[in-house]
Amino acid sequence: MPKTFLSIGECMIELSQAGDGHLKKGFAGDSFNTAWYARAFLGGGWQVSYFTALGTDRLSDEMLAFMSSAGIATDHVRRIDGRNPGMYMIHLKDGERSFQYWRETSAARLLAEDRERLRAAIDGAELVYFSGITLAILSPDDRGRLIDEIRRARELGKTVAFDPNLRPRLWESTDSMCAAISDGARAATMIFPSFDDERSYFGDTTPEATAKRYRDLGAELVVVKDGENGITISDAEALVHVRAHPANPVRDTTSAGDSFNGAFLAMQLRGQPSRRAAEFAAKVAARVIEQPGALIGSDHLPQPEVV
C-alpha cells in the first residue's frame, strides 16, 4: 500500500489574463499547489490526497475532475449543498502579482466542521500539510479543531508540515493572525516561512531570527524562503544557506513558494538531505515563475536526480 501525503486547505477557481482582455479559468490555491508539485516529484510509493470541502455545483464537479486527472486523490473532499468554490483573479505587473478574491460562500470555510471526517483523513496519512491560509478561512472554533487534530497527528509520530503564509486581509486583526500562526507552528515538525512576511508581521530582522523563533516553538526543521537571497535551513544540527536559482524572465511569481514546498517535501520523502532538497526545490520555483499561472506542466519542470 502506498503512503499518503495529505494536504489540507482551499482550492479555488483561478482567473488569469489570457490576452486581448480575455480570462483563462483554472483551479489553484496554496495548499493545493503544494500537493500538485509534490505529486509531480513523488514516486509511486506515495499517494497525494487533498482534504477540503466543495459545493454540489458544476464548478465543484469540474474541480474534482481536475484534481483526479492530476493524480490527486479526492476521497476526503466533503460536498456541501448551497456552497461554492472560492474564486480569485490574478493581476500582474512586472511579474509581481496581486489578487482579487470572491470567497465569502466558499465551502472550504467549513472543511474542519466534521471532526470525525478530519481525523479519519489525518489518521490515514504519513505526512500532513497545511498553511496559514487554511487557518485563516476557518471560524475560530473550526480553527481550534483543526489545530487540535494536527497536534494529535504530531503526537502520533506523523510528519506535519506548515507554511505560515501570512495574509493579514484574511484575518480580523494582525494580532489574531500572529497568535493563530504561532499556534499552528507549535503543532508542526517542519515549517516553511517566507522572510518578507515574517519581517513585516513578526518583526524578525534576519532569516536566521525567523528560523530560531519557529525552532523555539518546537519545529524540528525550519526552511526560510527569502526570494533571490536564497534559503536558510535550520535543524538541530546546523544552519545552512542555499542559493536561489535564477529565473529568466520572471513572468508570474504566483505559486513560487508553494512549488518550492511541494518539491522540497517530495525530495525529503524520497530520502534526500535538506540541502539537496532545497537546491532542487529552488530550481523548481525558478521554472514556475518563468511561466504564467500557479500550476505548470511537467514539460517545464526539472527532473530530480535522486541518490
Image (cartoon, helix red, strand yellow):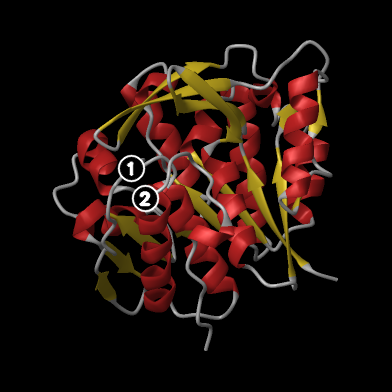
Of residue 186 and residue 121, the one placed in the foreground of this image is 121
Q: Can residue 189 be seen in this view?
A: no
Seen at 70% across and 21% down, the residue is 107
Residue 97 point in image, percent of width and height? 33, 31
The quarter of the picture where residue 13 lies is: top right
Seen at 34% across and 79% down, the residue is 237
Q: Name the residue under label 1.
A: 251
Of residue 215 and residue 246, the one placed in the foreground of this image is 246
Q: Can residue 272 be seen in this view?
A: yes
Residue 41 point in image, percent of width and height? 59, 67
* Crowding near the residue tagged with mark 1, few <14, some 14–19, many ≥20 C-alpha atoms within 10 Å: some
* Distance between mark 2 and mark 1 Cα atoms: 5 Å
Under mark 2, the amino acid is: Glu
From the viewer's perspective, tell me whether residue 77 is left or right of residue 99: right
Seen at 62% across and 48% down, the residue is 150
From the viewer's perspective, tell me whether residue 117 is left or right of residue 97: right
Secondary structure, mark 2, is loop
Q: Mark 2 points at which residue?
A: 290
Which of the two labelled residues, at mark 2 and mark 1, occupies the earlier sequence position? 1
Residue 85 point in image, percent of width and height? 67, 22
* Crowding near the residue tagged with mark 2, few <14, some 14–19, many ≥20 C-alpha atoms within 10 Å: many
Seen at 58% across and 25% down, the residue is 138
The reply to whether callout 2 and callout 1 are in contact (CB within 8 Å) is yes
Q: In which quarter of the image is the N terminus?
A: bottom right
From the viewer's perspective, tell me whether residue 175 is left or right of residue 58: left
Of residue 55 and residue 67, the one placed in the foreground of this image is 67
The quarter of the picture where residue 299 lies is: bottom right
Under mark 1, the amino acid is: Arg
